Amino acid sequence: MSRFRADNPDDGGRVPVLVTGAGSELALAIIKACRLSAIPLEVLACDADERALGLRWADRAFDVADARHDPAAYVNALRSIVAEHRVRLVLPTPDAELDLLPSYRDEFVDDLGCRIVINAAAEMERFHDKWLAYQWYREHDIAAPCTVRADRPNELAAFLTVVGYPVILKPRRGGGSRSLFEIRDRGELDRATPVVHDPIVQPLIGSDEAEFTAGTFRTPDNRVLTIVMRRKLKFGLTWRAEIVEDPALHEFCRRVIRKTQLEGVNNVQFRMTSNGPQVLEINPRFSSTTGMRAHFGFNEVELAVRQYVLGERVTQPVIRGGSAQRFMHEEYAAVPADAPTPVEVPV
C-alpha cells in the first residue's frame, strides 16, 4: 500500500471513520455527511486511483489496491489502515467492495474493533440483484412493478403483449440509474438491449413527478428511522429533491424494511401509482443523497457512529423541510513540479 498523503492533524477526540472508493459520487456524499455530523469525525479515505477527489477532501488519504483485480491486497490494505489509525467504522461505496466486504464483517469487529457498515452477504446479494429482489418482493407481498429478464425471449414476448410500451430497460445488478433506458417500441428495445449488461425489463409506472427516495436506518431493536424525499433524476443521480412529510409514505418505507433482514443504513426507491406506492429498488447501502439527507437533519453517518461506536439508542431525527438542487462543479489542482513535460501533438 502506498500512502501518498499522511498529514497528521491532532484528532481532538474525533472518531476515525474510513470512506472507501473515494472517487465516487457516493463517497463524496458520505464525506459531506461526515462534515455535518454533530459528533466530530476524523475522515480517512482510500481509493485505487490517487487522483480520486474524495482523497483531497479527507483528513488522511491512502492509495490501496483495486478490489476488483486484487481483493486480497485490498482487504490487507484496509486492515493496515484500520489497525494503524484505530478506525471505528468503514463506510464502503464501490460495488466490488460491497460484494467483497460482507465476508469480513465479523473479523473486523473481533480482531480490530471496527465495524464495516454493510449488510450480511445474503441480503447484499438479494438486493443488489434486481431479479432476485423481484422474486423476494412477490414472496413477501411487497408492491413492485412486474419484472422479466430480457434474455428469456418467450417470457419477454408474453410480458410485452400484456404490458405494451413504454417499458424500462436496466441492468440486473448495480446501483445508480445511468444504464436505465425508457423504451418506446420494439426497435428501441432491440437497439438498447445489447448495451445493457444482463438486462431486465419493467413497465413504466407512475410519473417522473411521483418518484421518491427514502433513507432508512434500522436499529437492533427493529425500529426504522426514515426520511422521504420526492426526486427528479438527471445523469443517473437525484438532481432535485424535496422533503416529503406524508406519514403514510414513511410508514410504507418502515413496513418494507421490516420485512427484510436488512440492518442499519438502507435506501428505498419507489413511485406512487393509482394503486399506491410501488418499490422500484431497495439499495442495501448508503445513497448518493446521503449528503442531502444530512443537511435536512437525517445524518446516516452520525446515526451509525452513535449506534455502533458510542452504543447510544438512536431515535428518529427531526427533519427540516426544504429542497435541494444538485449541480456540476470542478475542483482544481496545481501541476506538480516533477510532472512530465506535455508531449506536443502534431496538427
Image (cartoon, helix red, strand yellow):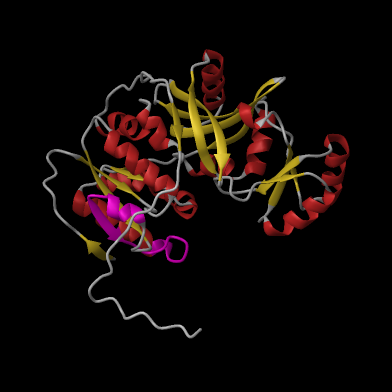
User: Relative to 149, is 71 above or below?
Assistant: below
Residue at point 52%, 27% (across, down): 257
**Image side of residue 121 versus residue 274, left or right:** left
Quadrant the N terminus occupies: bottom left
Residue at point 51%, 21% (across, down): 254
Q: Is residue 72 visible?
A: yes
Q: Is residue 116 visible?
A: no
Foreground of the two, 131 or 321: 321
Percent position of residue 45, x then y: 30, 52
Residue 62 belongs to the span the image colors magenta? yes
Residue at point 22%, 74% (across, down): 337
User: Relative to 13, is 187 above or below?
Assistant: below
Query: In the orientation shown, which residue stands out farthest toward the bottom?
Result: 346
Residue 26 belongs to the span the image colors magenta? no
Residue at point 36%, 31% (across, down): 294
Q: Quadrant of residue 332?
A: bottom left
How many marks are shown on the rendered structure? 0
**Image side of residue 144 versus residue 6, left or right:** right
**Image side of residue 184 versus residue 249, left or right:** right
Q: Give the magenta part as a residue range.
A: 53-72
User: Relative to 149, is 35 above or below?
Assistant: above
Query: In the orientation shown, which residue stands out farthest toward the top?
Result: 247
Percent position of residue 235, x then y: 55, 47
Percent position of residue 236, x then y: 56, 45
Percent position of residue 278, x then y: 65, 27
Q: Quadrant of residue 201?
A: top right
